[in-house]
């Protein structure tokens, strides 16, 4: 487990490899309203980045509203500069 502080992020992630800057994403998570069951098929096997699924899931409400995401994004910007 890592305890991240503004100082540790700068020292460990920004100053450590200045040519390979830290990339941070703040994303909105939207859960499924109901679980989706998928049958195992050969098309899903192997090392594949993307697989087209034969379903159209029903989505629930986002986990966080836009105001909460904006607050998190501001905190991230403040922490990493």
Image (cartoon, helix red, strand yellow):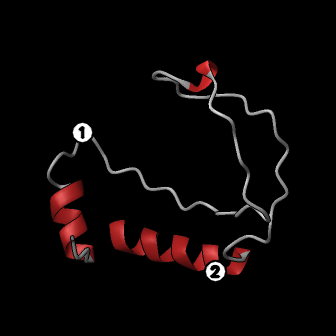
**Mark number for residue 5?**
none
Tag on residue 19?
1
Judging depth in this view, the residue of 1 and 57 nearest the camera is 57
Nearer to us in this view, 18 or 73? 73
For residue 1, above or below residue 42: below
Residue 5 position by quadrant = bottom left
Taking depth in this image into account, of 33 and 77 the one nearest to the observer is 33
Secondary structure type for disc 1: loop
Look at the picture and state if 20 lies above or below 29: above
Q: Quadrant of residue 78?
A: bottom left
- Identify whether 11 is placed above or below 50: below
Q: Earlier in the sequence, mark 1 or mark 2?
A: 1
Instruction: Look at mark 2 in the image and give the residue it sits on.
Output: 68
In front here: 65 or 58?
Answer: 58
**Residue 32 at x, y percent in the picture:** 74, 61
User: Which residue is at 64% across, 63% downward?
Assistant: 29
Q: Is residue 9 above or below residue 70?
A: above
Whether residue 46 sits left or right of residue 32 in the image: it is left
Q: Position of residue 53 (x, y in %)?
A: 74, 33
The residue sitting at 34% across, 66% down in the picture is 80
- State the quadrant of the C terminus: bottom left
* Residue under the image location 67 percent in, 76 percent down: 64
Q: Which residue occupies 64% across, 28% down?
A: 51
Q: Nearer the viewer, mark 1 or mark 2?
A: 2
42 horizontally vs 6: left or right: right
């Amino acid at each position: 487990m890592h305890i991240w502080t503004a100082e540790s992020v700068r020292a460990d992630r920004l100053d450590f490899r200045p040519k390979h800057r830290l990339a941070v994403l703040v994303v909105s998570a939207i859960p499924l309203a109901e679980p989706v069951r998928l049958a195992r098929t050969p098309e899903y096997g192997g090392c594949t980045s993307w697989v087209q699924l034969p379903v159209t899931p029903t989505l629930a409400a986002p986990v966080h509203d836009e105001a909460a995401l904006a607050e998190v994004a501001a905190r991230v910007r403040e922490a990493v500069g």
